[in-house]
């Protein structure tokens, strides 16, 4: 069970963007697909329009919107 996201950016008091930092050293495509699914759950829960998976060791950001299906 995921323990949650790391931060939420608010716009007029409402969740706009959810940020989820990942420290995986070498995430596989399957890992990224799972992470995107978790983030979609967070987006639905908070009502945010989009979210970002921030892969710290890769130095990349993967944007996710509700209804996205990661490859």
Image: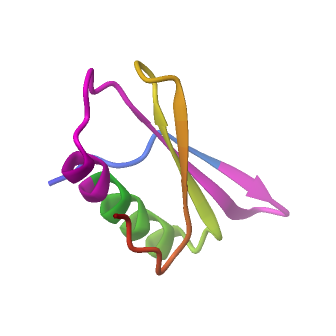
**Which stretch appears magenta?**
9-34
Q: Is residue 36 above or below residue 44?
A: above
Q: How is the image coloured?
A: rainbow
Please state the total of marks drawn on the protein image. Answer: 0
Q: Nearer the viewer, residue 36 or 47?
A: 36
Q: Is residue 36 above or below residue 41?
A: above
Q: Nearer the viewer, residue 65 or 70?
A: 70
Q: Residue most toward the left? A: 1
Please indicate whether residue 47 sits to the left or right of residue 21 in the image.
right
Q: Position of residue 9 (x, y in %)?
A: 69, 49
Q: Position of residue 29 (x, y in %)?
A: 26, 48
Q: Nearer the viewer, residue 63 or 40?
A: 63
- What residue is at 40 percent from the left and 18 percent from the top? 57
- What residue is at 31 percent from the left and 49 percent from the top? 32
- Judge whether residue 18 is colored magenta: yes
- What residue is at 56 percent from the left and 56 percent from the top? 51
Please indicate whether residue 2 sits to the left or right of residue 16 in the image.
left
Q: Position of residue 65 (x, y in %)?
A: 56, 69
Quadrant of the rendering where the C terminus is positioned: bottom left
- Judge whether residue 8 is colored magenta: no
Quadrant of the rendering where the N terminus is positioned: bottom left
Q: Residue most toward the right? A: 12
Q: Is residue 29 above or below residue 70?
A: above
Q: Nearer the viewer, residue 16 or 14?
A: 16
């Amino acid at each position: 069970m995921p323990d949650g996201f790391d931060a939420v950016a608010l716009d007029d008091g409402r969740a706009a963007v959810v940020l989820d930092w990942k420290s995986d050293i070498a995430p596989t495509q399957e890992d990224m697909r799972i992470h995107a699914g978790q983030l979609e759950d967070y987006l639905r829960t908070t009502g945010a329009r989009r979210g970002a998976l921030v892969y710290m060791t890769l130095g990349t950001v993967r944007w996710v919107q509700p209804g996205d299906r990661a490859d």
